[in-house]
Image: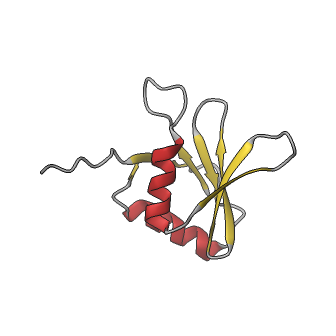
Amino acid sequence: MSFDRPAPVRFILDERRFGLVSFPRPKGRTRIPLEPLQAAIEQTLGVRFEVRRERLFGPKIHSFVYMGERVKIRMLDSGDAHIDLAGVDDDVREIILEHLRQSHEFEAQ
């Protein structure tokens, strides 16, 4: 019996902006699919996602709470996704980044 693991989700740590993690869209796609990204984050960090609107008719914001800190995933017009960890606690930011680096669900570029 063969078990096909999904391809790891690629991420890039932005060296110019502190705490910004980018998830580029796959080649040939117009947007990054949220389901694999969401599943990888949920499995790696052991969190549950929430989808809410910040304003009454605003865009849907995907977020999760990790160690008491709310972390939001922003979908950009280019089709990429970003997590901005600059506003969360230093210890929480380092733990999240370390989990991303060591997880088999993610692949750094």
Could you say which is closer to the camera, residue 54 or residue 1? Answer: 1
Could you say which is closer to the camera, residue 88 or residue 44? Answer: 44
Colour mode? secondary structure
Q: How far across and how far down the image is residue 90, in percent?
A: 64, 73
Q: How far across and how far down the image is residue 83, in percent?
A: 62, 52
Q: How far across and how far down the image is residue 26, in percent?
A: 44, 33
Tell me which residue sits at (86%, 47%) in the image.
55
* Residue projecting furthest to the right: 56
* Residue projecting furthest to the front: 1
* Residue projecting furthest to the top: 28
Q: How many marks?
A: 0
Q: How far across and how far down the image is residue 107, in percent?
A: 38, 50
Q: Is residue 51 above or below residue 102?
A: above
Image-based side of 108 in relation to 76, left or right = left
* Residue projecting furthest to the left: 1
Tell me which residue sits at (20%, 51%) in the image.
3
- Residue 109 visible in the snapshot: no
Q: Is residue 25 above or below residue 107?
A: above
Which image quadrant is residue 47 in?
bottom right
Tell me which residue sits at (36%, 48%) in the image.
8
- Residue 94 visible in the snapshot: yes
